[in-house]
Image (cartoon, rainbow, N blue to C red):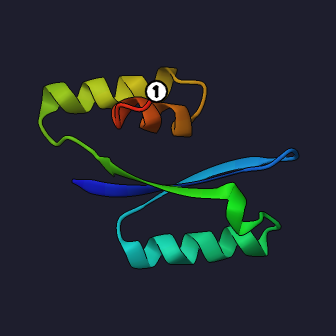
Amino acid sequence: MRFYLIHAKNSDAEKSVFVVSQADAAGARKELVNEGFKRADITTTEVDVPTDKTRLLNFLNLMATSPSIAVASERLAGRG
């Protein structure tokens, strides 16, 4: 199952949101800009969430034990 992680971080705040479509991603980015984040501070990462029991549990454990959702997603994408 494909999700999109929208992550915004600046010197004052950090926020992450999962959405299920590119249209929702655009809306989430717009909302973050309205909350005061600059567009350059916002990243979008495509995340494939496994649906079989074993891999889904591994995914959830990684999400629960990472310092942030963004870090967990980077690890899942092989970039961290």
Local packing at callout 1 (Cα closer than 10 Å; few below 14, some 14-19, many 20+) is few
Task: Please determine whether, in this image, residue 39 is positioned above or below residue 66.
Answer: below
Q: For the residue labelled by badge 1, is the local secondary structure a helix, a strand or a loop? A: loop
Observer-nearest of 55 and 8: 8
Most extreme residue toward the left, as rendered? 52
Residue corresponding to mark 1: 80
What percent of the width, then of the height, locates residue 57? 26, 26
Residue drawn at the location 88% of the way across and 46% of the way down: 12
Q: Is residue 22 left or right of residue 39?
A: left
Task: Please determine whether, in this image, residue 1 is positioned above or below residue 64.
Answer: below
What percent of the width, then of the height, locates residue 14? 73, 46
Q: Is residue 29 left or right of residue 35?
A: left
Q: Amino acid at mark 1?
A: Gly
Q: Quadrant of residue 2?
A: bottom left
Q: Count the marks.
A: 1
Task: Please determine whether, in this image, residue 76 is positioned above or below residue 33.
Answer: above
Q: Quadrant of residue 33?
A: bottom right
Residue drawn at the location 60% of the way across and 70% of the way down: 29
What percent of the width, then of the height, locates residue 25? 48, 70
Observer-nearest of 78 and 51: 78
Most extreme residue toward the right, as rendered? 12
Residue drawn at the location 40% of the way across and 58% of the way down: 4
Q: Is residue 11 left or right of residue 45?
A: right
Q: Quadrant of residue 23?
A: bottom left
What percent of the width, then of the height, locates residue 16? 59, 50
Task: Please determine whether, in this image, residue 55 is positioned above or below residue 35.
Answer: above
Residue drawn at the location 11% of the way across and 36% of the way down: 52
